[in-house]
Image (cartoon, rainbow, N blue to C red):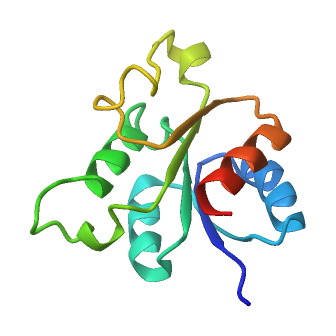
Amino acid sequence: MSSKKILIIDDDPDFVTAMQIPLESNSYSVISADSGKEGLQMIKKENPDLIILDIMLEKDTTGFHVAYTLRSDDANSEYRDYKDIPIIVVTSIHQAKRFKFSPDTDAEFLPVDEFLEKPLNPDELLEKVKRLIG
């Protein structure tokens, strides 16, 4: 049986490693991209089972654009086959920009499945991953 594949889209290599270690120790296969553009390319190339997405990448709003691109209702979208991949946003936008939103109340604003604040609790990450993809 092959392990579930998780794509981490985050521009901080130390943070990617910090997420990768508990995920791989729980038998998940982890790949990463350090920009929104590379992340979108990797989604088409690797077809991951789950995406862990930072918001502030090349620009402060890149992660939003990646989420909107993936969840587009446009039947002609090149990402239409990836629309249902679960997305967990992991970000420090609240501390860095004082920008407040909640996926519980802003589901249409930010079309993702889960939201976690940095710094990250590895057990909380694993709980959300297991709930979304087993």
Q: Nearer the viewer, residue 39 or 28?
A: 28
**Quadrant that contains the C terminus:** bottom right
Image mark count = 0
Q: Nearer the viewer, residue 122 or 12?
A: 122
Quarter holding residue 121: top right
The residue most toward the top is: 98
Q: Is residue 123 left or right of residue 8?
A: right
Q: Where residue 115 sits: x, y (%)?
A: 56, 34
Vertical placement of 104 versus 54: above or below?
Answer: above
**What residue sits 47% from the left and 77% below the top?**
47
Vertical placement of 27 versus 34: above or below?
Answer: below
Q: Where residue 71 sits: x, y (%)?
A: 29, 52
Q: Is residue 58 left or right of residue 120?
A: left
Quarter holding residue 3: bottom right
Q: Where residue 40 sits: x, y (%)?
A: 39, 64
**What residue sits 90% from the left and 65% below the top?**
25
The residue most toward the right is: 25
**Quadrant that contains the N terminus:** bottom right
Q: Where residue 28 sits: x, y (%)?
A: 75, 70
Q: Is residue 66 left or right of residue 76?
A: right
**What residue sits 83% from the left and 67% below the top?**
24
**What residue sits 84% from the left and 42% below the top?**
123
